[in-house]
Image (cartoon, rainbow, N blue to C red):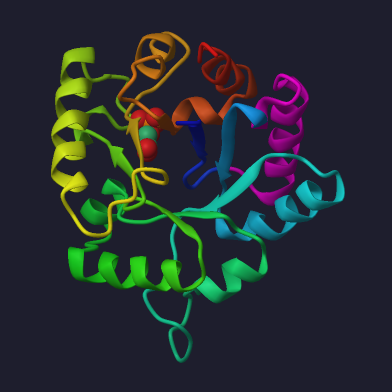
Amino acid sequence: MKKIIIGNWKLNLDHLQGIQLLQKINYSLPKDVEENIDIVLAPSHTSLRSLQTVISTDKLKIKLSSQDVSMYKEGAYTGEVSSTQLEKLDISYSIIGHSERRTLLNENDEIINQKLKRLLEQRITPIFEIIFAYEPIWAIGTGQVATIENIIEVLDFTKNLISSKSFYDQEKSRFIYGGSVSPDNSEEILNLNIVDGALVGGASLDSDKFVKIVNSIKL
Ligand code: PGA
């Protein structure tokens, strides 16, 4: 399975800073990296258009993800961004059900389920259901990483649970880890067979660290 590294920029960087970081990352990535590893960046909504323009003009092989999507298709929902709008921008992925939104913004399963449907309608890959992310809440943004045994145990359990469901697609479902991934621990985590990639928060804001994480995958 091709591994995937997703940089989740969270509520950081304006669009000009975002373009700079995208270009730095692109410049430092190994040539033809996309043949072996999918590289995805998830900036704020306000940066998506600018980054997408740079990616398509310069024909970069980096893909974009939104950090969220509306559960509604369209209408009187002030402040929302729809899956159709994202699809028009060539956004390939969208993070939904992130633990920060669940805990800080009271998102529940019902809402996340609606968001999932909106994404699937537009053929945008959800980073949640199709790519199952194991993110121990206590490890997100804390610098504390889960133990290797813990990662294997939880991903194994999740995989077993999911693989019996009708929507499971062995070819397309990826199981990734998120929670304080850094160049110090990425080699050990990302080279586990069961780990198909990582959702990287803090370390993705630093191009050197992000590229080191990508490079720690043994091909
Ligand atoms: P972190 O964030 O790497 O800063 O812990 C992970 C995430 O939000 O997925």
| Residue 25 among those drawn in magenta | yes
Which residues fall within the magenta stretch?
13-34
Quadrant of the rendered structure where residue 175 is? top left
- Note whether 6 is above or below 79 in the view shown: above
At 23% from the left and 14% from the top, the residue drawn is 148
Q: Please state if 109 lies on the left or on the right of 35 as rendered.
A: left
Quadrant of the rendered structure where residue 69 is? bottom left
Percent across and percent down for residue 124 are 50, 61
Percent across and percent down for residue 2 are 50, 31
Q: Main secondary structure of the magenta part?
A: helix
Q: Is residue 145 visible?
A: yes
Percent across and percent down for residue 143 are 32, 20
The quadrant of the image that shows the N terminus is top left
Which quarter of the rendered image does ligand 1 occupy? top left
- Note whether 51 is above or below 76 in the view shown: above
Percent across and percent down for residue 54 are 80, 48
Task: Farthest residue to the right: give it.
Answer: 57
At 73% from the left and 20% from the top, the residue drawn is 28
Camera-side residue: 156 or 73?
156
At 17% from the left and 14% from the top, the residue drawn is 149
Camera-side residue: 117 or 16?
117
The quadrant of the image that shows the C terminus is top right
Camera-side residue: 216 or 171?
171
Q: Please state if 116 lies on the left or on the right of 153 as rendered.
A: right
Task: Farthest residue to the bottom: give it.
Answer: 76
Q: Please state if 19 lies on the left or on the right of 212 as rendered.
A: right
| Residue 133 among those drawn in magenta | no
Q: Please state if 40 lies on the left or on the right of 193 as rendered.
A: right
